[in-house]
Amino acid sequence: MLPERTDVLVVGAGPTGLAVAATLAGHGVTATVVDRLASPPVTSRAAVVHAGTLEVLDRIGVAAPLADRGLPSSRFTVRDRDRVLLTVPFDRLPSRYPYALLVSQAETEAVLADRLTALGGRVLRPYELTGLDLDGAGATATFAGGRTVRARWVVGADGMRSPVRELAGIDFGGPADPGESFLLADVRVDSALPRDQVNLFLARQGPLVWAPLPDGTVRLVAEVPDAPREPQARHFQELLDERGPVQRPDRVTEVRWSSRFRIHHRIAGSYRSGPVLLAGDAAHVHSPAGGQGMNLGLRDAVALGDTLAAVLAGGPDTLLDGYAAARRPLAEEVLGFAAGLTRLTAVPPVARPLRDLLLRTASGLHPVRQRLAVRLAGFEPAGR
């Protein structure tokens, strides 16, 4: 049941919201976490947690149990059909987690929820935010049915279409277009590709991500001109036929789950508006290339939880301005990096041989491979 008052109201119980609440709980602060869904989703888009994110999650007691549920990936490979253009190894990362952890977002959320419960917190469902009145002392949140909660701070961790962001009047910059269209699925596939690496296929038609998961399925994510409303096995077989291996082609044997989505490249005008703070997809969205979105959101969450705890312990409110000022440039960098990976696919045919040559040359240079590995892994400057 909703309380009448709370220090921190977290709207959204996805990875970002759960991580904010678990971080606060570790500091002895009990946040009120609400979500509009009656139960947690069992399917999800994100399928990788990078080493830099695992290092951050280790501070809140989540990395080890999450690693137990995932599949370590030793490298990231960029391909043009059968040709390997670039290999980025993770085994020399400066981390206790020298790999990319392949794990369903549903598992990530379950581990975060378990940690929050162990620290005395819980998620209240289903509560849909319908109103938000801000003033100098906090905010009054109104939910469907008329219930209200008075909060000193409100965290918007409620996704790309964030009601918190919209009700707070925070701009979400970006072009007014329908966005990039993507298909995704967890499939069973007969394949000769190694099961210890993520593959990014660059094709004239668009990029295709091939990522193995711990249960033996493979996550496929592909940009397409117009995703069908109900994707079928044949759609993913066609994607593999036109973009995947040729000499030993993949064959889809089962689709466990499929969906479609659109992505806009956008960043919130500000991460703070008075008592409202944004994190995760509510603050930034971009291409899924490189698996950066959820990872950045999780790192946002721990940084925000630490900062809110410091403010509630007597620190100045301006610490939260520091959070907003530090995190937004990181989102701009990630957006540019993900867009750059996507642009590798859009190279015109006449320039593709040069692109391929440059990638193969980079793959042969250890310093370049190491810089790319560190960049993909999501290590951030100290203090961010």
Image (cartoon, rainbow, N blue to C red):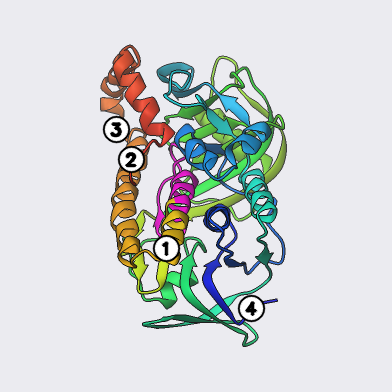
Q: Whole-Å distance between the Cαs marked 4 and 3?
A: 57 Å
Q: Secondary structure at mark 4?
A: loop
Q: Nearer the viewer, residue 130 or 185?
A: 130
- Picture coordinates of residue 368, whole percent (x, y): 30, 20
Residue 298 is a magenta residue: yes
Mark 3 lies on a secondary structure that is loop
Q: Which residue is mark 4?
A: 3
Could you tell which of marks 1 and 3 lies nearer the N-terminus?
1
Of badges 1 and 4, nearer the viewer stands 4
Type of amino acid at the residue the image marks with label 4: Pro
Residue highlighted by disc 3:
348
Q: Is 129 rendered above or below residue 18?
A: below
Are the residues flagged by discs 2 and 4 in contact, CB closer than 8 Å?
no
Q: Amino acid at mark 2?
A: Ala
Closer to the chain start, of discs 4 and 3, is 4
Query: Identity of the amino acid at label 3?
Result: Pro
Extreme residue toward the top, this view: 364
Residue 97 against residue 297 in the figure, above or below: above
Earlier-in-chain disc, 2 versus 3: 3
Q: Residue at x 45, y 47 (%)?
A: 299
Residue depth check, mark 1 versus mark 3: number of the one nearer the observer: 1
Can you give x and y, in whole percent of width and height, for residue 8 in the image?
51, 69
Q: Secondary structure at mark 1?
A: strand
Spot occupied by residue 33 in the image (x, y as percentages of width and height) = 60, 66
**Residue at the disc numbered 1:** 278
Task: Measure the alpha-carbon separation of dots 2 and 3.
Answer: 39 Å
Query: Camera-side residue: 203 or 192?
Result: 192
Nearer the observer, 118 or 175? 118
Earlier residue among tags 2 and 4: 4
Range covered by the magenta-colored residues: 279-302
Mark 1 / mark 4, whichever is N-terminal:
4
Mark 2 or mark 1: which comes first in sequence?
A: 1
